Image (cartoon, coloured by chain):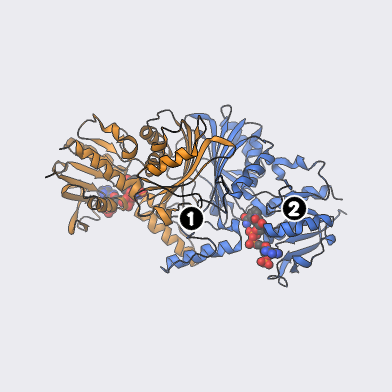
Chain colours: A orange, B blue
Amino acid sequence: MNPSFNVAVVGATGSVGETLVQILEELAFPVATLHLLASMESAGSSVMFAGRKVRVREVDSFDFGQVRLAFFAAGAAVSRSFADKARQAGCAVIDLSGALPDALALVPEANAQALHGLAQPAWVCSPSAAAVALAVTLAPLRQHLEIERIHVTACLAVSAQGREAVNELARQTAELLNARPLEPRFFDRQMAFNLLARVGEEDAQGHSVLERRLVSELRVLLGLPDVKIAVTCIQVPVFFGDSYSVSVQTRRPVDLAVVQGALDSAPSIERVEADDYPTPVGDAVGQDVVYVGRVRLGIDEPEQLNLWMTTDNVRKGAALNAVQVAQLLIKDMV
Amino acid sequence: MNPSFNVAVVGATGSVGETLVQILEELAFPVATLHLLASMESAGSSVMFAGRKVRVREVDSFDFGQVRLAFFAAGAAVSRSFADKARQAGCAVIDLSGALPDALALVPEANAQALHGLAQPAWVCSPSAAAVALAVTLAPLRQHLEIERIHVTACLAVSAQGREAVNELARQTAELLNARPLEPRFFDRQMAFNLLARVGEEDAQGHSVLERRLVSELRVLLGLPDVKIAVTCIQVPVFFGDSYSVSVQTRRPVDLAVVQGALDSAPSIERVEADDYPTPVGDAVGQDVVYVGRVRLGIDEPEQLNLWMTTDNVRKGAALNAVQVAQLLIKDMV
Ligand SMILES: NC(=O)c1ccc[n+]([C@@H]2O[C@H](COP(=O)([O-])OP(=O)(O)OC[C@H]3O[C@@H](n4cnc5c(N)ncnc54)[C@H](OP(=O)(O)O)[C@@H]3O)[C@@H](O)[C@H]2O)c1
Ligand SMILES: NC(=O)c1ccc[n+]([C@@H]2O[C@H](COP(=O)([O-])OP(=O)(O)OC[C@H]3O[C@@H](n4cnc5c(N)ncnc54)[C@H](OP(=O)(O)O)[C@@H]3O)[C@@H](O)[C@H]2O)c1
């Protein structure tokens, strides 16, 4: 019999956590006992897993010595407070918050090899959804393109900010359609029928934390520590599914047929032909792949590859990638 | 007394046409008689101008010999059918459809000098809203930056496609909020809470007509015939106000203080400071300027300038620019 593992999901009642629990079941991850953790607010509620109800408990009083593997999907503060405690207790940590800067960023399709010789218990992170999507798409192209610079405009769904943001977009939209005055709550201004040019705070140089994080994670994931990356992350009035407008400068002319072939052979990519294009609502939501469309050279510039990507931020961008990372980790954990 | 002119507005009942008539009044454009033209459908209705009702008539039976200046804001087919007739009758033509490839693209803030020695009657066009916004913003920076390449992701409001598109976004949103099945009409798929990766048809190389048009217009407007421009035009669920994520590669390091100073001195630009950013709904709509925010260098790349722009596509992007062009034209038409 194959070994199975005690697993904890911190933030099990959130968008990512709920999906993570579903995916553990769908992929028949070898779970012995599943521990679901959240804040005091949800403690006592329960979540279905493998046909039975699992009670949600408070993370504060949890003994991580009981589990071999813990997913942290409850925000930066919770990862900062409890991830190290878990490691001390001998538990492998997969963080989804980005709050552990020394955790190794992993996307199996891009840098699985980085796991070789990793210190135990593992201390890794599932990168930002944008880094996952870009790494999945660009990794199979790396060997065919000499990438000089990547330009990305990331159009993030409100679910990238959790359940509350989803509710707020719905509430704002209803208020506006009913011609009632808008009082923004979760966002600091109107999000419905609007675009916000920045997600989160910005630093003295004008870059948001998320933009900085994307650049450093993508360099690691692609194994291109010096690649130049220009990124703008905006918030769009879409519930689920991030989209990306991407332009890659290369040192040599791009062979479009080779690029299309590489995308078509990649198992986690679905390429959409030129007469159509993928959308977050029509394609990405609920799916396990990154949809890629509008694949084209630059205008008067054969050293440029342009494309459009869309993917389920909660699923492929977070929960599924984290479980795929876990599948690799347990190979060394027998 | 200053001379005044007989003027025709073709498409006077549309989003752009209505705004154009308003702006002629607001700017006290020297109109002698105003002729409002549209299709059979609206003929007979009337529009207010300078305190009195002006009857809308059918363009088909109009004698352009009666006017010195005609704005064409009724789509490509109408410009193709009637603009040349107007020119033959000695009337200056300002096209807003982009259907007259030999018409000179004009944005007064960028290339007013191109009017010198123009053949009469003038045959000019107010370029796409994206080209207007980019030209207004980049023209004052031209002398300070050696621009090598421009990357743009243009996030277009549905009003860029006229009144019907606006109604359709409202209708789709209401259907979805009421959990009724969605049957897309104007757009070929769900537009509410979604992003469409392309606006209009694409050519064999994968570029849309609008993207090609933006590249050729912007090169003319900036007087940079060889500048490389990478552009992706997407459709976003916003009613009014286009937004642009822009990244400019330069041949020398960018001096951010100089850039900010040049933007601040430009009369048609409102720069938003680093602690905030402009949005289409909160800033652009109904305004005469281009809002510019998130002005920053590249990450590890001082030869890169990044910024975010938003502007009223119907007003600054189309109607106002067309009237500003007309103000220049009539100087030579006494
Ligand atoms: N959403 C995405 O697309 C996405 C993508 C990549 C990474 N991530 C990351 O994944 C994490 C979760 O995001 P989400 O979208 O799932 O957020 P969410 O829907 O708001 O859920 C937050 C979860 O964290 C729990 N939590 C909050 N404060 C807690 C505390 N003090 N102690 C214990 N549990 C606490 C909540 O439990 P209660 O029910 O008790 O409040 C809930 O289970 C975040 O770090 C986020 O950055 C999200
Ligand atoms: N909207 C923008 O942001 C924007 C920006 C730049 C340029 N433009 C260009 O401006 C033009 C108008 O756009 P819009 O947004 O105002 O469109 P719109 O709201 O749909 O209005 C279309 C106008 O054209 C008239 N029209 C349509 N078919 C006609 C025909 N066969 N004969 C005579 N008149 C006809 C309509 O008159 P009826 O009332 O009789 O139907 C209406 O006045 C288009 O060429 C567009 O590409 C628009």
Q: Residue at x 57, y 56 (%)?
A: B240
Q: Which residue is mark 1?
A: A190
Is residue A232 visible from the viewing direction of this image?
yes
Q: Residue at x 25, y 30 (%)?
A: A116
Label 1 – label 2 distance at C-alpha: 36 Å
| Of marks 1 and 2, the one in the foreground | 2
Is residue A85 visible from the viewing direction of this image?
no
Q: Quadrant of the C terminus of chain A?
A: top left
The chain identifier of the residue carrying mark 1 reads A
Q: Circle 2 sits in a helix, a strand or a loop, which is it?
A: strand
Q: Circle 1 sits in a helix, a strand or a loop, which is it?
A: loop
Q: Which residue is mark 2?
A: B94
The chain identifier of the residue carrying mark 2 reads B
The reply, left or right, for residue A159 in relation to residue B65 is: left
Q: Amino acid at mark 1?
A: Gln
What is the number of callouts on the image? 2
Residue B288 spot, x, y in % from top left: 65, 51
Residue A34 spot, x, y in % from top left: 17, 50
Using the image, determine if residue A141 lies above or below residue A42.
above
Q: Nearer the viewer, residue A133 or A69?
A: A133
Which of the 4 image quarters holds residue A88? top left
Q: Amino acid at mark 2?
A: Ile
Q: Nearer the viewer, residue A157 or A188?
A: A157
The reply, left or right, for residue A173 in relation to residue A73 is: right
Q: Nearer the viewer, residue A321 or A183?
A: A321
Q: Nearer the viewer, residue B185 or B27?
A: B185
Using the image, determine if residue B23 lies above or below residue A122.
below
